[in-house]
Image (spheres, rainbow, N blue to C red):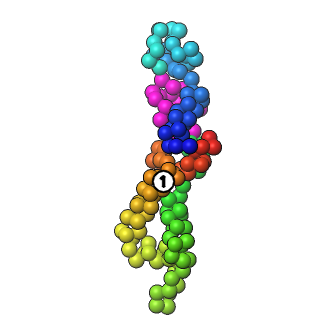
């Protein structure tokens, strides 16, 4: 499933889980038109969360509630360990490879981590929702 398909499915899910809401009259409007004032300029109401225009906030709320965000630091550390080995000896000190790199050159660590995360996004392995990243296969399961 492509990123666009996932975004479409998440938007459909947001519409399924919310009800149109007239903020002026402060009533739910399941028909899509407010029976009190006749307005069709309606917000979305998500039970237990609130009301707002659009669906991005609904998608963020659903994803945050249903899924666990990726720990980017951990994912990158695992990739480093798999690529370069689990340990390194520096003089008489033994450290994990990822910890040694992170402590010796934190700027290079951050740059490499950002590039790795970008590559996962380009490969459509992960997707950003509301500032956090989630595995595509987890989003598909929603």
In magenta, the rendered stretch is 43-62
Q: Which quadrant of the view contains residue 82? A: bottom right
**Badge 1: how crowded within 10 Å, few (<14), some, or many (20+)?**
few
Pick the residue in front: 56 or 21: 56
**Residue 58 visible in the shown view:** no
What is the residue that sits farthest to the right in this orientation? 141
Q: Is residue 59 magenta?
A: yes
Residue 41 % position (x, y)? 44, 18
Residue at image coords 56%, 23%? 19
Residue at image coords 56%, 35%? 9
**Residue 118 visible in the shown view:** yes
What is the residue that sits farthest to the bottom in this orientation? 92
Residue at image coords 60%, 29%? 17
Q: Pick the quarter of the image with the N terminus.
A: top right
What is the residue that sits farthest to the left in this orientation? 107
Q: Which quadrant of the view contains residue 85? A: bottom right
106, above or below 12, in the image: below
Residue 133 % position (x, y)? 50, 51
Residue at image coords 51%, 76%? 84
40, above or below 122, in the image: above
110, above or below 16, in the image: below
- Asked which secondary structure carries label 1, the reply is loop
Q: Pick the quarter of the image with the C terminus.
A: top right
Residue 36 % position (x, y)? 51, 8
Q: Is residue 2 magenta?
A: no
Count of residue discs: 1
Residue on which the image places disc 1: 123
């Amino acid at each position: 499933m492509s990123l666009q398909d996932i975004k479409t499915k998440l938007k459909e899910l947001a519409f399924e889980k919310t009800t149109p809401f007239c903020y002026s009259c402060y009533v739910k409007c399941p028909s899509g038109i407010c029976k009190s004032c006749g307005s069709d300029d309606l917000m979305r109401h998500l039970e237990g969360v609130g009301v707002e225009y659009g669906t991005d906030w609904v998608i963020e709320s659903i994803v945050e509630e249903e899924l666990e965000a990726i720990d980017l630091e951990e994912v990158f550390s695992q990739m480093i360990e798999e690529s370069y080995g689990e340990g390194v000896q520096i003089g008489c000190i033994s450290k994990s490879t990822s910890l040694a790199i992170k402590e010796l050159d934190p700027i290079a660590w951050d740059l490499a981590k950002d590039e790795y995360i970008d590559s996962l996004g380009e490969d459509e392995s992960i997707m950003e929702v509301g500032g956090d990243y989630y595995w595509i296969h987890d989003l598909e399961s929603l």
